[in-house]
Amino acid sequence: MPLPTLSITSALMIILTLLVSPLLTRLFRNTKSAHDLAARIKTAVFLAFLVSLVPLASFIYKTPESTISSWNWINTESFHMTVSFNFDFYTLVFIPVALFVTWSILEFALWYMESDPNIARFFLYLLVFLFAMMILVSSNNLYQLFIGWEGVGMMSFLLIGWWHSRADANTAALQAVAYNRVGDIGLLFVLAATLGDFNSWQINEIVELAKTKDVTPIMFAFIIAATGKSAQFGLHPWLPAAMEGPTPVSSLLHSSTMVVAGIFLLIRVSPLIEICPPAATLCLWLGALTTLFTATCALTQSDLKKIIAFSTSSQLGLMMVTIGLNQADLAFLHICTHAFFKAMLFLCAGSAIHCLNDEQDIRKMGGLYKLAPFTSACLALGSLALTGTPFLAGFFSKDAIIEALNTSYLNAWALALTLIATSFTAVYSMRIVYYVVMGTPRNPALSPINENNTYVLRSLARLACGSIIAGFLLSLHILPPKTPVMTMSFTLKMAAIAVTVIGFLLALELAYLASKQHKPTPQLTPHRFSNMLGYFPTIIHRSVPKMSMHMGQKVASQAVDQTWLEKVGPKAVTSSNRPMISTASNLQRGLIMTHLGMFLLTLVLAILMGFR
């Protein structure tokens, strides 16, 4: 179908040109104010979103697929690679979603970052962040994907540490880089292994050639890369720490860019996971452990942004579970629906924090439905979508994932952990609504509460509409080609909604007990485990440096001080000569009896030798 392919290629080239144009204007002298440049970047993203609807509509009605090779990049006798873009199902659907969400976030940031003197540079960083993610999702070879992969990592470092005068922001940025470097080791191993085994970096060629070989080491390396970028268990602490950045950064980072890059990489190579059962099992277990652990950590947090951050990590674990079930299309559907309500939750949190003099503790909020009704409504709507309330965006993907897990013959423990985590999602979502929206205000009376700004209202309204209808539209037009079996009992069918309702009731009961102080002190052991993040930062971030410092101290004291100086170096000469010196000095004490004794001894010896 040459016509649809041509329109898709042209439209996506126009999108890339629109996004690059604000970057090029910074190379020339510009007399516009910083706020005008930021607004221009927002407009460029909006226009790119409108253009991206053309290839999406073409895909829905014609279903074309094209791989565009632009020019030769590396060309040797044994290796050939071109700059190639793969405009397939995943790319054509993800790009409009990412552009729509980013457009809303940038419009919100015009209000949130209004007083920042470097707002133009901030918007440029966000634009480069988005551009790197689009390179990642449209790449058809691993090297090109690696450029986008490192691009989002570099921009996350700059944006998380945007307020670089704060020590916590610098620490969080360095922590994000350190954990992502561990994941990058996995991707570098993949680059080396595929070049050695298949002599190619083209993703479609690797998928075809690997079907006849043992790809277990390569798939484990892919999973390590995704674990670092998508904050799975073991490499997860950087995600809540990233909340030190501005709220628009948190919203963009957690909704449609950085954290879904690892999951998207596994979706790209999902045909290899199907032929590698150990990799699928590892994804299943890793995702189930991540979704339960991070949901547990979210239960007792008091920082509003950190609760939402842990919910992101929990949803990423659910996506990893879906990949372990060999249902990559459902994981991709959850990525798209999750982007809308997660971005809206962060923007609602930013609006509430901005209105309360930068207060982030939910225990000092309350009664926001009277003071900021639109923000409160969107926060409640986003929390309901997150829990999988029927017919909101999260329901169409989350319910399908749990039903696929119920009907699979894989691991029952993974199913149990995922259902418990789903119940916990309802608990902490209800906890946010109870403490922030309901009740009476617990904030200072003179807080400058004002949500009546068109930037705030329009961005939240768009994302609210997406949170309501996006799941229905995506599931209606984009059906997965490998639909799971949906023949199940009523109990299994209602399992997801049942555990969600149980979570809501449990959260209400706990909130009532806490507000009435019927139980003033919590159970210390489980509360500390959840509140201190499973002791993971304490063990990893403190014990390892402490052990290395103790090791260095012992090496310095024992190997240098005690061994070299005491046993080998200067003091060794003293210690080796001391016995001989002591003996000689003992013989030369000036005592007359000693001299007479020595004289008598030598005389006797001389006489005896003389008689011989």
Image (spheres, rainbow, N blue to C red):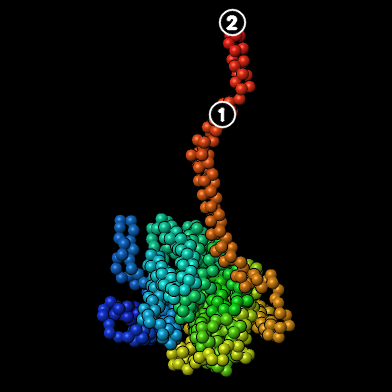
The residue beneath circle 1 is 585
Residue sticking out furthest to the front: 592
155 and 443: which is toward the camera: 443
Q: Position of residue 433 (x, y in %)?
A: 60, 86
Contact, CB < 8 Å: mark 2 with mark 1? no
* Helix, strand or loop status at disc 2: loop
Quarter of the N terminus within the rendering: bottom left
Quarter of the C terminus within the rendering: top right
Residue 49 lies in quadrant: bottom left
- Classify 185 as above or below 468: above
Q: Nearer the viewer, mark 2 or mark 1?
A: 1
Residue 391 in view: no
Q: Label 2 sits on what residue type?
A: Arg
* Point 36% across, 84% down: residue: 38
- Labelled disc at residue 612: 2
Q: Position of residue 441 (x, y in %)?
A: 60, 90
* Point 41% across, 55% down: residue: 196
Q: Position of residue 92 (x, y in %)?
A: 41, 78
Q: Cα distance, mark 2 to mark 1? A: 34 Å
Q: Label 1 sits on what residue type?
A: Ser
Compared across the picture, whether 22 is left or right of 260 comes to left
3 and 437: which is toward the camera: 437
- Judge the density around disc 1: few (<14), some (14-19), many (≥20) Cα neighbours within 10 Å: few
174 and 555: which is toward the camera: 555
Residue 27 lies in quadrant: bottom left
Q: Position of residue 355 (x, y in %)?
A: 51, 88
